[in-house]
Amino acid sequence: MSKTVLITGAGAGFGRDAAVTLANAGHTVFASMRDPRGRGRDQAEALRQQGVEVVEIDVADDASVESGVKAVFARAGRIDVLVNNASIAAAGVTEAFTSDQAKIVLDTNVVGVLRASCAVLPIMRAQREGLIVNIGSILGRVTFPLFGIYGASKFAVEAITDSLRYEVSPFGVEVVLVQLSEYPTPMYASIQQPANPARAATYGEIGEFPGKMFERFMGMFAALDAPGPHDVATEVAELVAAPRGGRPPRLVVGRGFGADAVNEAVEPIQRRVIEGLGLGALALSPARDAARWQGELRSSSADGFPSRIAGKCVTAVGPVRRAH
């Protein structure tokens, strides 16, 4: 079944590949980018020649996101899938980054996801169905030194993804996180580096780690058994094609560096926490169990919070211990 798909940050890399892959699969795809009539003109034209429609969206700008989503809805009459792909990478000694640099990364990687999601959700909730795919990273589960700012943004995307998944499930909307590992991508060419290299230099060999790591990655990417960046587009296409209720909450694409093990360990703990809060129905498949969720709301106490929360919280997450 053909769907209407909007992909942010689709001028190059994973976003562009996913846009073309989904268009080839028969979907109506809108690839968003900044300045498609100016510096992105060649990229936009190349996408149009492959059957992809182009819309101007800067995820760091509220008005741009609202305008772009309205344009897609006006042209297609619905939005079935949002792929939040736009992202900025940063690597280097954390102390050597400026606060303004950190704000740029967080505004794009975190607030950008929120802007786009909030713009499409009224449409999806009215449709009583929809899918949001957030492109995250294994660095939202495990930490690499010198990737603190980028990793912080991806940890935040983990939280936003999970919270949205629970909140919109009664409306038939699914939210999935794709945790990417290392892949050949233009991201490495445009990665943000510390604005204060003199301070980074005081760290000696530690500050040289990102460059050495990228050299190792480039060697891996040149090998015959190198990870293929098309893996990402393939996984996104499979998520789009999957039936509602049959999609995983998150999946690792590429080498997990332990992120897959963290996913497996955290999942039952998270489930018990939600059940302990008396909100277990939100963890069920979208729409299928909306009636059960409404029943839980009706059984809530006078202040609107589930009446059995107190007892469940103690058994689910254990007693609260004071800090000493």
Image (cartoon, rainbow, N blue to C red):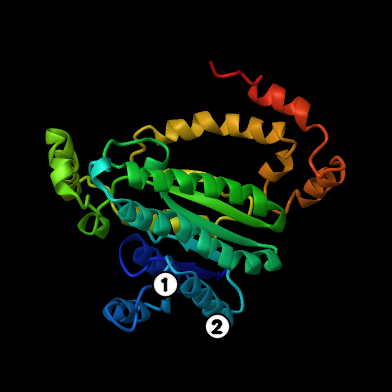
Question: Does the image show residue 212?
Answer: no
Q: Amino acid at mark 1?
A: Ser
Q: What residue lies at 66% left-to-right and 51% top-to-bottom? A: 167
Identify which residue is drawn at 51% across, 28% down: 265
Q: Residues within 10 Å of mark 1 (few under 14, many from 20)?
A: many
In primary-sequence order, the first of circles 2 and 1 is 1
Identify residue for label 2: 75
Amino acid type for the residue under numbered disc 2: Arg
Q: Position of residue 146 (x, y in %)?
A: 26, 40
**How far from the left and from the top, in percent, is residue 110?**
45, 54
**In the depicted view, which residue is nearer to us: 131 or 153?**
153
Question: Residue 103's x, y, as percent?
Answer: 37, 55
Q: How far apart are the two marked residues, 2 and 1, measured between alpha carbons?
A: 14 Å
* Res. 94 image quadrant: top left
Q: Secondary structure at mark 1?
A: strand
Q: Secondary structure at mark 2?
A: helix
Write the residue at 33% across / 70% down. Answer: 11
Measured as percent of width and height from the top left, residue 121 is found at 61, 64
Q: Which mark is residue 32?
A: 1
